[in-house]
Image: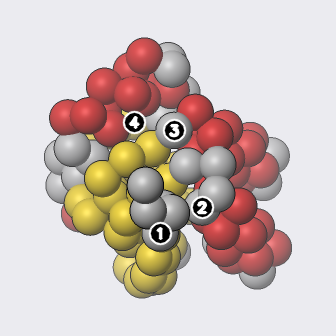
């Protein structure tokens, strides 16, 4: 089995940071997401949309990292949102009860608008 790969691209729309995630988020790649997020949060980015359009998988380790990111931005008055997740990823969020903490959006533009 091939090792998971995660590519993270950053975009800014107004005061909202968008991370476009491509690949898989598992125990091996989740630290990359944590490190990228911690860097941006330390720079003052506390409104973050995670675009999952090109993400094919997330494990509980990935959700754990997203939960830590949520707690970090909430402590600074911010918020996160998830956009464009496929059915499998959405179902994983639901099973892990993450949808009770974070809003999922069909379109990134709607998530950005709500976080502004």
**Who's the residue at 47% across and 69% down the image?**
5
Residue drawn at x 50%, y 18% is 97
Q: Which residue is mark 1?
A: 5
Q: First in sequence: mark 2 or mark 1?
A: 1
Q: What residue lies at 24% left-to-right and 60% top-to-bottom?
A: 53
Ranked by sequence position, the earlier of labels 2 and 4 is 2
- Residue density around tag 4, few if under 14, some if 14–19, many if 20 or more, within 10 Å: some
Between disc 3 and disc 2, whose residue precedes? 2
For label 1, the crowd category at 10 Å Cα-Cα, with few meaning under 14, some 14 to 19 and many 20 or more, is some
Residue bearing mark 3 = 59
- Residue of label 2: 29
Specify few, some or many for label 3: CA neighbours under 10 Å numbering under 14, 14-19, or 20 or more.
some
Tell me if 110 is positioned left or right of 77 in this view: left
Residue 103, numbered circle: 4
What is the x, y in percent for residue 25?
50, 53
The Cα–Cα distance between marks 3 and 1, rounded to whole angstroms, is: 13 Å
> How far is disc 2 from disc 4 in space, using C-alphas?
23 Å
What's the CA distance linking mark 3 and mark 2? 10 Å
Say which of 39 and 63 sits in front: 63
Check disc 3 and report its element: helix, strand or loop: loop
């Amino acid at each position: 089995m091939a090792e998971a790969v995660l590519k993270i691209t950053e975009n800014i729309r107004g005061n909202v940071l968008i991370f476009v995630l491509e690949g898989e988020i598992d125990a091996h790649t989740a630290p990359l997401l944590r490190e990228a997020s911690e860097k941006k949060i330390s720079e003052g980015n506390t409104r973050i949309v995670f675009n999952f359009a090109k993400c094919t998988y997330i494990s509980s380790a990935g959700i754990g990292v997203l939960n830590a990111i949520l707690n970090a931005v909430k402590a600074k008055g911010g918020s996160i949102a998830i956009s464009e997740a496929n059915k499998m990823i959405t179902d994983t969020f639901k099973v892990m009860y993450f949808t009770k903490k974070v809003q999922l959006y069909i379109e990134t533009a709607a998530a950005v608008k709500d976080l502004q």
